[in-house]
Amino acid sequence: MILQPLPKDIKIIGFYLGKIILGIAITMALPILCGLAFGEVNPAVDFIIAIEISFIAGLFLMITCRTDEDLNWMQGMIVVSLSWLVVMALGAIPLYLSGHWKSFLDACFDTMSGLATTGLTLAQDIDHLSYTHNFWRHLIMFIGGQGIVIIALSFFVKGFSGAFRMYVGEARDERILPNVIHTSRFIWSVSITYLILGALALGLTGMASGMKPVNAFFHGACVFMAAFDTGGFAPQSQNILYYHSFVYEAITVVIMILGALNFKLHFHIWQGRRKEIFKNIETVTLLFTILVTFAVCALGLAQSGAYRGALMFFRKGFYQLISGHTGTGFQTIYAGQFLTDWNNLALSGVILAMALGGAVCSTTGAIKMLRLGIIFKAFKEDLKRIIMPERALVVEKFHHIKEVFLDDKLSRSALMITLAYIILYLCGALIGMFYGYPFLSALFESTSAAANVGLSCGITAAGMPAGLKVTYIAQMWSGRLEFMSVFTILGFLAAFIKGKK
Amino acid sequence: MKKRFLIAFMLLGLLICSRQRCFAQATSSSELIKNARFYDGQLVVYEGEVIGDLMRRADGVWVNLNDGPGAIGVWMSSFLARKINYAGNYKTRGDRLEVAGIFHRACLEHGGDLDIHAQGINVIAAGREVSEKLNLDKRNLAVILLGIIILLWISTLLRRK
């Protein structure tokens, strides 16, 4: 029997949602500082309006739903999934006010794309977008990559047991440190250290490439945020092709790979335990899948005769592949070139890479390496059971920070999430086909949205049907939260309608 | 009669001069990208606004030109790039250039970039600074919203009392 949620549940959800909204409102002060620094008046006013609306919404929820009670699992999951939708709407306000997005839905699309670190965009005339709005586009990737709730946990929550429930709801089920708030702070300290180093490297390269110092460092910071958080936005409409620089591309490849690694692995590397990189099941699987998908992609590209020479293969073939595999979505070719220059085999290689993703507890989306490694080990275990004598005791284990014995619960969970992702990719492709796009293009774009990648073969444009925009928003949202929070909110709505008092 | 002839002669002279300064019909970025294999290695005319930075390298300059639907990188000599005064961004409209050059689907010289190697350029419209005025509707909305926040704040204080 399903029970209808109590008013108390709604109050608790509303109160914590209000807290998260206030947290996001405060982060909107950063673009205002950027606007003031560059002397951009109207863009700064856009953000003042957005902050005010967010404050009103947050304060209203906190006043009307005031409570001292802690969150339970169900409430924590719902707060997370709702906060992503609410923050999407609030974060879209300044973008829409800039006039560079044709509709509020388009602005919401880009905000969700940024928060979920996807990188698909419907923006118009990015080349004339203000520094202020451009900074916000990239900042939301940084915020979304670390996790909206992590901001609240790091800065606004002094410590409560519901924190872990929200942390898990945001698809981060691994604690690096015993305390979840310390874990959030560690994630921030890693990200900010890399931000300084990465922005400096990209800024200096930009200057060496002929950019003005201010632009070079602004682009460096933005591109770093997009690369490390495996987002994929860039300050100019040509994405990474704008820079026409091999060194710039090589640095972004390193940052993208760093972003695709588990924060837990970063912690161990920071602690001096570098051997973990070579032993960890995730890094081993990542290396293997990169080699396999690149082999498929390279075969396809060789067949199509699109590129000649090793340098071209690296800058055009390997770059798009690693960008897709890490879930970043940076492009050094135009979207249309995927269909005109690449054949179906090369496209399939990229689709496969996008579908697999990076490490768990990183900023990438998709199935992820740990799950893939576990599934592989489970298959190996079953094969051994068939081959070996019946009396033999078959035990399979893998190394992920420590030695872990493979059990059925782990395998089932990995298979369930993998299956959910495959269904999500196919559903999006079916809807794309319903709107008249060919199968492979529809699958490419759907996988890119659901796996939070951001590579586009040209379907994502302001002129695409509104139904498809909503589909991709839903895919980005559920793909980023890895289904659990989304299923919980659907269950909550069902209980609200059908449940008994 | 003499005067009319003179005017007609001058107009004809102007027309010839202006035609000499224009290249053939420009091809759009979307057309070039869509049919890149067809245009590969051909002399094309492309028209667009200079955007971002002029990226000076040892042996030339990268200029990105946006024609509306998209932007394409144009590789030109420093001598040609001297004609450019404005590059477009939020506060500037860049010079509008007409470029005649060789189109590459995957340039061998530049690691496979889709680009145009300019042989000649014309500035067909000069860029300018864009002055920014405060949008009064936005300002008024911001003031009204601030009032609502203050009211909410006061109501919280009264509730506590």
Image: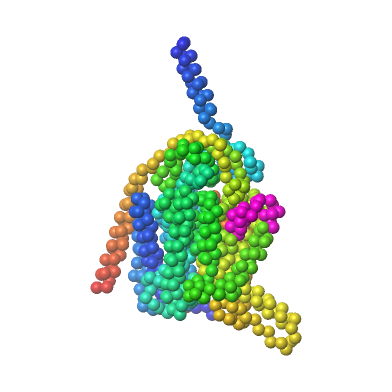
Q: What secondary structure predominates along the stretch shown in magenta?
A: helix
Does residue A475 show up? no
- Name which quarter of the figure residue A72 lies in: bottom left
**How many numbered marks does the figure carry?**
0
Q: Is residue A320 magenta?
A: yes
Q: Which residues are magenta?
A: A299-321
A267 to the left or right of B44:
left
Tell me residue A375's x, y (percent). Answer: 64, 74
Residue A52, percent from left and from top: 35, 60
Q: Nearer the viewer, residue A35 or A320?
A: A320
Residue A53 drawn at (x, y percent): 37, 60
The image shows residue A301, relative to residue A20, as above or below, that is above
**Residue A241 appears anywhere in the view:** yes
The magenta stretch spans residue A173? no
State the quadrant of the C terminus of chain B. Answer: bottom left
Task: Measuring from the top left, give residue A209's x and y in whole percent.
Answer: 49, 50
- In the image: residue A45, left or right of residue A283: left
State whether residue A182 is above or below residue A131: below
Is A241 located above or below residue A288 in the figure? Answer: above
Which residue corresponds to the image point at 58% horizontal and 73% vertical from the top-left? A278
Q: In the current view of this chain or complex, which residue is farthest to the left? A: B161
Q: Is residue B29 left or right of residue B136?
A: right
Look at 57% across and 60% down and name the residue there: A323
Q: Residue at x 43, y 69 (%)?
A: A189
